[in-house]
Image (cartoon, rainbow, N blue to C red):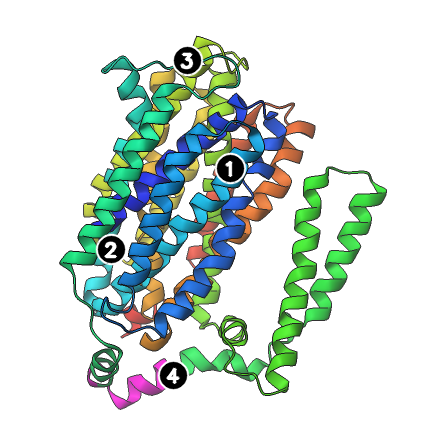
Amino acid sequence: MSFGFLGIQFGFALQNANVSRIFETLNAKVENIPILWIAAPITGLIIQPIIGHISDCTWNRLGRRRPYFLTGAILASIALLIMPNSPALWVAAGMLWVMDASINVSMEPFRAFVGDMLPSEQRTKGFAMQSFFIGTGAVIASALPYLLTNIFKVANTAPKGVIPASVQYSFYIGATVFFIAVLWTVIRTKEYSPAQLAEYNKETFTEEEQIIYTNAVTSPQKTKNKIFSPAYYIIIGVLLSAFFYFKELAGELYILSFGFVIFGLLIFLAGSLKKTGYHKNGFVVIVDDFLKMPQTMKQLALVQFFSWFALFAMWIYTTPAITRHIFGTTDTSSAVFNEGANWVGICFAVYNGVAAIFAFILPILAKKTSRKITHIISLIAGGLGLISIFFFKDPVMLLLSMVGVGIAWASILSMPYAILTGALPSNKMGVYMGIFNFFIVIPQILAASVLGFFTKNFFNDDAAYTLILGGVSMMLAAVIVIFVKDEDEKK
């Protein structure tokens, strides 16, 4: 079931380790890198709940989730072939949008797939297995430019404004692995039909548990969701926009203020359509499900928010942080810069390798303690790992930092989902997994809108300080886990 994630993470790892490098090679300024990355989270915000909702309602010869695995794999493989040949910065930014959309089409149904196919007692192992394949794929993908340069002697430098051959060949390999790995899962797995899943869920809950389960899903409706009144968000967005305008602050901050306005308008539109009888409209269903999130999902949302803010800070700023703070250069055409950028790939390979190994420890640790305690320990390790990067001057010592990040990464990819699936109805697994992605995407949008501003105005373009900010965010996520209710543990 999880083998396709080897390919999916090949694509994501190549993106995470090399896109900032590609942008800088194509003459992007360091403070503008976050805004160029904005395509990735916005794409996930739109694509994942839509694909989740549609896949919940799909059943054909390929199954329920598998049609989307395959479609995303084909499109992502094409995008991976094109990305490293971008002739200009705007082309690379556009291809990031296409590539991320395609990867999201494949990835979202994989999360729901494990939730569909495994009973509660196997889900921790199931999502840990996903972490293993994610880690394994990312180790190889992240290290590819370094390996091609040092073992196969592929050129690692190029004329100014040209992407090195080591990066190009890495993306070609990634496209091939992505397609083959996902195709393997499509061919080698079967799916239970919606009728089989419904029958199973009836048999596995007692009458009392059914009442608790139903209330967990529907109780938010009773609050009438006053906190989600569209007027609040529209007013906040307008006031923030006015503040940014009169203070003449950076343009990317408007992403934050416009986001509030758009969110308010979407809630207003969904409410209006529902009142006029369009309650079965897909858009209305997604917004309505968002407003009726189970309590456990709301609590995990905050954990995800601060965890992924930290991760996005790392993915955006590790390359400029290491190349400037440790290798001492900002010249993207120099051999030293590209050596540092390759070392970032090695660092990312190490944290993903640690994640792949730690994935086997997670179920044991969770059984000995609890899923919550396991996640708290892991997030603290990750926060300390990010903060420690600032204090190291020897590139080799950065590998120690990556051990902490890898422990956190393994847990972030499994524990929240293992906890979440116990609070979700089976017929809404896809759409709620997609909605849960909001709390991965929103912090990334926030990071894209504010990190460049902070790095330029408060950190003097030294991205190592931005990584400290990410570490603090991850530590805060660990504290919030304490207040999460794990429904499966209560059962």
Secondary structure of residue under mark 4: helix
Q: CA distance from mark 1 to mark 2?
A: 28 Å
- Whichever of callouts 4 and 2 sits on the residue coming sooner in the sequence is 4
* Residue at image mark 1: 313
- Whichever of callouts 1 and 3 sits on the residue coming sooner in the sequence is 3
In percent of the image, x 30 and y 30: which residue is there? Answer: 349
Q: Position of residue 260 (x, y in %)?
A: 67, 58
Which of the 4 image quarters holds residue 137?
A: top left
Identify the mark at residue 214; answer none if there is no mark. Answer: 4
Q: Residues within 10 Å of mark 1 (few under 14, many from 20)?
A: many
Secondary structure of residue under mark 1: helix
Q: CA distance from mark 2 to mark 3?
A: 46 Å
Secondary structure of residue under mark 2: helix
Q: Position of residue 12 (x, y in %)?
A: 37, 41
Span of residues in magenta: 203-214
Q: Nearer the viewer, residue 115 or 286?
A: 286
Question: What kind of residue is marked 2?
Answer: Ala
Q: Residues within 10 Å of mark 3 (few under 14, many from 20)?
A: many
Q: Tell me, yes or no, whether the two marked residues, 3 and 4, touch with CB atoms within 8 Å.
A: no
- Whichever of callouts 2 and 3 sits on the residue coming sooner in the sequence is 3
In percent of the image, x 43 and y 34: which residue is there? Answer: 83
Quadrant into which the N terminus falls: bottom left
Q: Residues within 10 Å of mark 2 (few under 14, many from 20)?
A: some
Residue placed furthest toward the left: 188
Question: What kind of residue is marked 4?
Answer: Thr
Question: What kind of residue is marked 1?
Answer: Ala
Left or right: 88 as drawn, with respect to 326: right
* Residue at image mark 2: 366
Left or right: 61 as drawn, with respect to 246: left
By secondary structure, the bulk of the magenta-drawn segment is best described as helix
Q: Position of residue 426 (x, y in %)?
A: 31, 75
Quick check: 19 above or below 198?
A: above
